[in-house]
Image: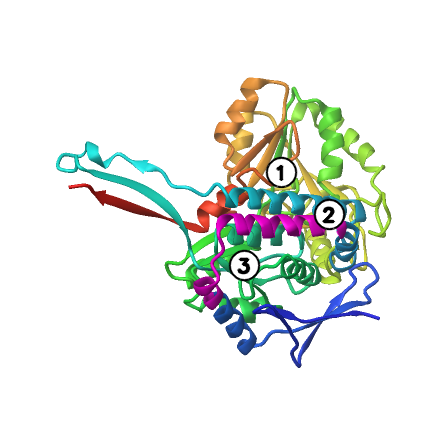
């Protein structure tokens, strides 16, 4: 029997006439049915958030205590949350458990940062005529935060939105991805149990084209934090006026394998990072730029390492690659690979689809105008691209409209620093995959990959305003 869940608005679990069906991504059976929000529900959620922000302000230590309690609940319910993500997101069990651990870190970091929000002194007395004045800044909450999250990290990316927002003293209206709303609602239940005052967190579920549009047109929301496609992010930017935005958007991560790289380490790392969770993360390695002198050797080592990847049922402990989020997305990946093949690309390994499952795939002889290279494929597909000169390689990879994270494998420090200065990304990872992320670091991209930074400390800066206070001592 499928789980039945309702919307979380103003501290209550609200049912609606229309229901949304959530599918188990591996079995394709119904996993849960969720109340689907209408216009009135979204308006109620925003109204509740605004009223709670105005009337239920918590002291920094109170915010810390509530967030800390949520981490304790997650520790106890770790397996329940992990299995929920296995079902609704198709995330392999081991990776789902890791996500719970990361979400605990994200919320705990936010709790600690709630006690550290501060301004700074401003030496205005140095200005002629202001000798008898003093000034300092304080940081104040922005008000109501509208958070929109994707399917691929249904717990940790929700935590990255709501935990810093609440730590900063804001109220939140969250719209999780329609494909994976159960985890977000379970997290809301943890906040309820931890004693968060009603209205400070509201969760509405439904189509982004409907709910997202209503949220972006509501002037009561002062700041938006969104993770998703560049197309939707641009639309949000164009339709939210002068409101603050934090946008984590698309990417097609480049990773350089230098002629002085440790090829065994690079192959072992990328064979896992390129295909974990079926390649459905924003910083999954996608474009592998390999020096011509080591291309054949690296390609052999990569395909050899890929033989150890366990593909299939995400409920199994050792599965690395499970299903994609839907059959439609798997078909899209298949179409892009087939189009590349028809245009001259070679499939080194993989290239087959069964339902929502798409085999880990390596392509070579690709060109920049192919979708598998130019766009974000968001599937277990990587392309090997040969290069001869590092400066030419970097100039080529920088032609991408995206720039979230990239990587380079090299033993040469000069090469590493040259790449760090010249690869146009928000973060460059040296001797590791572009997929490396810990939750306390500043995380965000350039170009079409985003605007603003995540990471609790940095998100809190985005979700607060700096206010100047001047004292006239005359």
157, above or below 180, in the image: above
Secondary element under disc 1, as helix, strand or loop, is loop
Magenta region: 50-77
Q: CA distance from mark 1 to mark 3?
A: 21 Å
Residue depicted at x 83% and y 40%: 309
Label 3 belongs to which residue?
147
Label disc, if present, on residue 438 of the rendered structure: 1
Q: CA distance from mark 1 to mark 2?
A: 19 Å
Answer left or right for 197 relative to 295.
Answer: left
Horizontal and vertical percent position of residue 193: 66, 60
User: Which quadrant of the figure contains the C terminus?
Assistant: top left
Q: Nearer the viewer, residue 221 or 423?
A: 221
Horizontal and vertical percent position of residue 442: 53, 39
Query: Tag 2 or tag 1, which sits nearer the N-term?
Result: 2
Query: Residue 368 magenta-drawn?
Result: no
Q: Residues within 10 Å of mark 1 (few under 14, many from 20)?
A: few
Q: Nearer the viewer, residue 292 or 376?
A: 376
Between tags 1 and 2, which lies in front?
2
Label 2 belongs to which residue?
75
């Amino acid at each position: 029997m499928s789980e039945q869940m309702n919307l979380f608005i103003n501290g209550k679990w609200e049912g609606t006439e229309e229901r949304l069906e959530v599918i188990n991504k591996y079995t394709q059976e119904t996993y849960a049915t969720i109340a689907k929000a209408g216009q009135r529900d979204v308006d109620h959620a925003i109204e509740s958030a605004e009223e709670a922000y105005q009337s239920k302000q918590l002291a920094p230590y109170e915010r810390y205590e509530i967030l800390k309690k949520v981490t304790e609940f997650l520790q106890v319910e770790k397996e329940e949350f992990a299995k929920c993500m296995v079902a609704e997101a198709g995330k392999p069990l081991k990776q789902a458990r890791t996500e719970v651990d990361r979400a605990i870190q994200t919320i705990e970091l936010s709790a600690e940062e709630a006690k550290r929000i501060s301004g700074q002194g401003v030496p205005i007395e140095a200005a002629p005529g202001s000798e008898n004045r003093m000034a300092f800044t304080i940081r104040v909450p922005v008000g109501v935060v509208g958070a929109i999250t994707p399917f691929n990290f249904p717990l940790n990316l929700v935590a990255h939105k709501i935990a810093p927002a609440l730590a900063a003293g804001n109220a939140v209206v969250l719209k999780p991805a329609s494909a994976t709303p159960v985890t977000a609602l379970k997290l809301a239940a943890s906040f309820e149990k931890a004693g968060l005052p009603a209205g400070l967190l509201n969760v509405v579920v439904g189509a982004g084209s409907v709910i997202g549009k209503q949220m972006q047109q509501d002037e009561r929301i002062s700041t938006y934090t969104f993770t998703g496609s560049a197309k939707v992010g641009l639309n949000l930017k164009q339709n939210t006026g002068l409101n603050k935005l934090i946008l984590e958007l698309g990417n097609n991560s480049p990773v350089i394998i230098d002629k002085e790289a440790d090829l065994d380490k690079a192959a072992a790392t990328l064979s896992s990072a390129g295909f974990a969770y079926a390649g459905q993360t924003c910083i999954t390695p996608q474009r592998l730029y390999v020096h011509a002198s080591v291309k054949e050797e690296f390609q052999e080592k990569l395909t050899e390492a890929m033989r150890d990847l366990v593909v299939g049922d995400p409920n199994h402990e050792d599965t690395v690659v499970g299903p994609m989020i839907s059959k439609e997305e798997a078909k899209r990946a298949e179409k892009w690979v087939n189009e590349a093949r028809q245009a001259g690309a070679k499939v080194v390994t993989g290239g087959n689809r069964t339902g929502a499952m798409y085999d880990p795939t390596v392509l070579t002889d690709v060109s920049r105008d192919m979708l598998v290279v130019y766009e974000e494929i968001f599937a277990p597909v990587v392309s090997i691209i040969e290069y001869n000169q590092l400066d030419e390689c970097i100039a080529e990879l920088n032609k991408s409209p995206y720039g979230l994270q990239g990587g380079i494998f090299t033993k040469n420090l000069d090469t590493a620093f040259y790449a760090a200065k010249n690869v146009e990304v928000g973060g460059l990872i040296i001797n590791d995959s572009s997929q490396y992320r810990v939750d306390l670091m500043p995380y965000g991209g350039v170009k079409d990959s985003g605007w603003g930074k995540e990471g609790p400390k940095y998100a809190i800066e985005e979700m607060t305003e700096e206010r100047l206070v001047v004292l006239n001592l005359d």
